Amino acid sequence: MQTHKRKRLEIVVEKRRAPAVLELLDREPGITGWTMLPCIGGRGHTGTRLPEGATDALDTVLILVVTSEEVAHRTMAAVLELLEEFVGVVLMGDVEVARPAHF
């Protein structure tokens, strides 16, 4: 099977801030789609977040994007600029896909 190199962006952001990130992604040429998953919990430099609260106000989501290297770098810069106002994490890594026309 032949595979093709792409970049994967992983964006963790508070659920209430996700619409702003998704709007940015939807405007970005070269991004054909995204996937959003709920985050169960985690720990980072701002502390621990667990799904034990009485409200979901601080819940986070994971937004996944697979795209070309050029688009990934441009998008990461735009998301990081947006996250200056929000709590969030952005990761970029290498992936290989089997259907390059989808990404």
Image: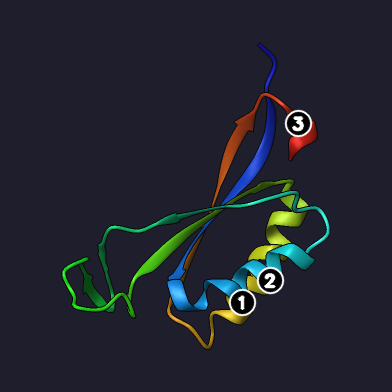
Q: Residue at x 54, y 79 (%)?
A: 83
- Residue 45 point in image, percent of width and height: 28, 75
Cα–Cα span, label 3 and label 2: 24 Å
Q: Residue at x 75, y 36 (%)?
A: 102
Q: Is residue 21 above or below residue 9?
A: below
Cα–Cα span, label 1 and label 3: 27 Å
User: Hey, what amino acid is under mark 1?
Assistant: Ala
Q: Using the rendered view, name the quadrant where residue 50 is placed.
A: bottom left
Tag in front: 1 or 3? 1
Q: Nearer the viewer, residue 16 or 98?
A: 16
Answer whether labels 2 and 1 touch (C-beta < 8 Å): yes
Answer whether labels 3 and 2 touch (C-beta < 8 Å): no
Quickly name the residue at label 3: 100
- Residue 36 point in image, percent of width and height: 51, 55
- Residue 7 point in image, percent of width and height: 64, 45
Q: Residues within 10 Å of mark 2 (few under 14, many from 20)?
A: few
Quickly name the residue at label 2: 23
Mark 1, secondary structure of its residue: helix
- Residue 29 point in image, percent of width and height: 83, 59
Q: Which comes sooner in the sequence, label 1 or label 3? A: 1
Quickly name the residue at label 1: 20
Q: Is residue 61 above or below residue 69?
A: below
Mark 3, secondary structure of its residue: helix
